[in-house]
Amino acid sequence: MILRVENGSFAYRGGPKILDGISFEVGPGEILAILGPNGAGKTTLLRCMMDMLRWNEGRSTLDGEDIHTMPARKLWRRMAYVPQAKSAASSYTAFQTVLLGRSSRIGAFSSPSSEDMKVTEQVMDRLGILGLADKHCHEISGGELQMVLIARAMAAEPEILVLDEPESNLDFRNQLIVLDTMSALASQGMACVFNTHYPAHALQRADKSLILSKGGSCTWGSTPSVVTEENIRRAFGVNAVIGEIETPENIMMNVIPLSVAGSGEKTDSIGDPEGNIIASVTIIMNNNENADRINQILHEYNHLLIGRMGLPHRRSGLYIINTTVEGKRSEVEALAHRLGIVPGISVKTTYARI
Amino acid sequence: MRRDGRLPNIWKIILIVLPFAAALIALGIGRMQISPGEVFDVLRTRLSGGHWADQPVEKTIMQLRLPRIVLAALVGAGLSVSGCAFQSLFANPLATPDTLGVASGASFGAALGILMGFGLIGVQIIALAMGGAAVLLTWLAGSGKDRGGLSYIVLSGIMIGSLFSALVSLIKYVADEESQLPAITYWLMGGLDKASFRTLALGAPVIIAGIAVFCLIRWRMNLLPLSDDEARASGVNVRTLRTVTVISATAITASCVSMCGQVGWVGLLIPHMCRMKFGSNHLSLIPASISLGAVFMIIVDTMARSISAAEIPVSILTAIIGAPFFIMLMRRSGGWRI
């Protein structure tokens, strides 16, 4: 399953172009983050992508089929939309709300079958919100409501999940819960597209990123190549540093905004992305759940690997992989990033001084 | 409440039995008191093709009270279910046939029909057309980008409603003082006393058809209060769903108005009572609104014709009961959500 936007442009009637020449694609198991300043048209981009607004030029396709001409019922069994939690206040119970996600599979004159009920329960159980089932949606917290809305989208059993600022308006804990849920779904093969205000969330979670600038142009590519200090300065008008924060298990990327950028300033770029580099990547998995995913990623970057050693540590149930890689800095960083966003594993990359 | 949104069996039984029980009792109440047992016997005899020995009793029940009670039940169920549908459609607890101007539009149509000397069918068709025009105008005027704004729809409904009320006044002004004006005025007050099986035969099918449509699509109606994007993302053709809802609710309202004038409050009170008791899931909300709407109207109409020697127009009674209830509802935050 590949969702692709080809050269999409959009303007509201009589207005200036909001989106101009947007192209990107996302496949199974990938997370795409859409970044951009307020008013750059992030939500408009999502709505155009899902054919809720019509592209003026260009198109969105799902496996090559134009979304605009796809029957709604067919499209929305494969794609699901999670709106911002604030827009969804109703007095339905959480269970009823999630059950509504089954709509495309329930006939106009029918009511939900026991199968629909079962799927709904399973989805809620999987997201850990079965306990909320009989609460009303206006009684639960914003974080819980966001999870309910994700569950509603999941109830449609989609292949691609589109989330509109899923973690905005949430506190730290709930942000983590929502982002972890998204990462977990992606590692099980779901494609996710999400809007966010936080470049750090893109760095920590997304395989690919797209930065929208005011005026409608965009930069799209693998996250490390897109979420750079230079691009953040250009799109947000903010001087920022991207740094690594080392935790006992991982090295996490973070973005710290420093100052509002003046017009002519230019930050130094660190390191030549085309230059050659050698690094050692250490991966520790504490279960086999993500082994396939890791192997798949390593396989993709096979041309970089110059050494690989797998080491099962039976007593503790750990599995340790040590790899040595050589290649362009941008590619090595991309590999380290792809591995780093797989949930439930520890990854560290050490760069050689050459 | 059950998790799947269906009514518990005990409530299913209550909601089916209650309107019939109310009707059976109401059949016996009036200037001529008849016991429920005797009413039952008369009905049974007539159903099996025979005639009841006591002619006046039979005539009172079969020709005076029965059509009126059937009409009351249909009008109550119809107004209640269409109020419920309008509330969900506009995601607005205040949306009812009255507040959206539908009833005023239909009244204008019906008054116009009377002025032009149409028969009941003609009056119904023109009431339906004007009711539809009113809800369309309200929708166009009140639904902008900000669909969440509760007051927009109701404000524009009040505007459209007063526009059509003015048109009704215009009709009254030009109507013939001797014959048409009293007919229009009396009819506008609302009353079920003109009920006969002949008028029922014309109006009832529309109401029954509308109610049947809502019963069929009642689970899908749960999608109505969602925002546009959410509703579209359900994969269901929401435009069709909304169109069917508007047409059915408007047809029911117009049909009720053309048979018994403007009966207010039912479409607001009963759905909210049901929402408080049964929740917002239309799977149980729709049947509950239908049943309790019918019961409410049977009771109110029975009061209207038996409380004093002269008959009280039923819309006066619904307002007397409705206004305090509405204030009570307004003060209880729980009753507000859709």
Image: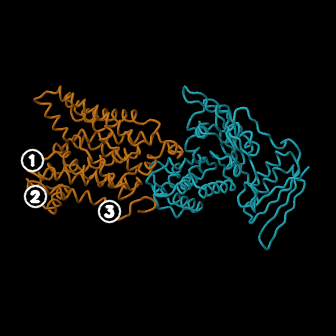
Mark positioned earlier in the residue sequence (1 or 3): 3
Query: Disc 3 is attached to a residue of which chain?
Result: B
Residue A127 at x, y = what percent? Answer: 59, 60
Query: Disc 1 is attached to a residue of which chain?
Result: B
Give the vertical position of B189 relative to A282 (above or below): above
Q: Give SS at disc 1.
A: loop
Q: Amino acid at mark 2?
A: Gln
Q: Where, by quadrant of the figure, is residue B130 drawn?
A: top left
Residue B246 at x, y = what percent? Answer: 38, 40
Residue at 54% over, 63% down: A130
Question: Could you give the CA–CA distance between mark 3 and mark 2, rounded to whole angstroms?
Answer: 28 Å
Q: Residues within 10 Å of mark 2 (few under 14, many from 20)?
A: few
Query: Disc 2 is attached to a residue of which chain?
Result: B
Q: Residues within 10 Å of mark 3 (few under 14, many from 20)?
A: few
Q: Amino acid at mark 1?
A: Ala
Q: Give SS at disc 2.
A: loop
Residue B4 at x, y = what percent? Answer: 46, 59
Q: Amino acid at mark 3?
A: Ile
Residue at 14% over, 56% down: B29
Q: Give SS at disc 3.
A: helix
Question: Could you give the CA–CA distance between mark 1 and mark 3, rounded to whole angstroms?
Answer: 36 Å
Viewer-closest of A270 and A190: A270
What's the image's color scheme? by chain
Mark positioned earlier in the residue sequence (2 or 1): 2
Q: Colour of chain A?
A: cyan
Identify the disc placed on residue B301: none
Which residue corresponds to mark 1? B310
Q: Is residue B96 rendered to the left or right of residue B29?
A: right
Chain drawn in orange: B
Which residue corresponds to mark 3? B13
Identify the disc placed on residue B33: 2
Residue B213 visible in the snapshot: no
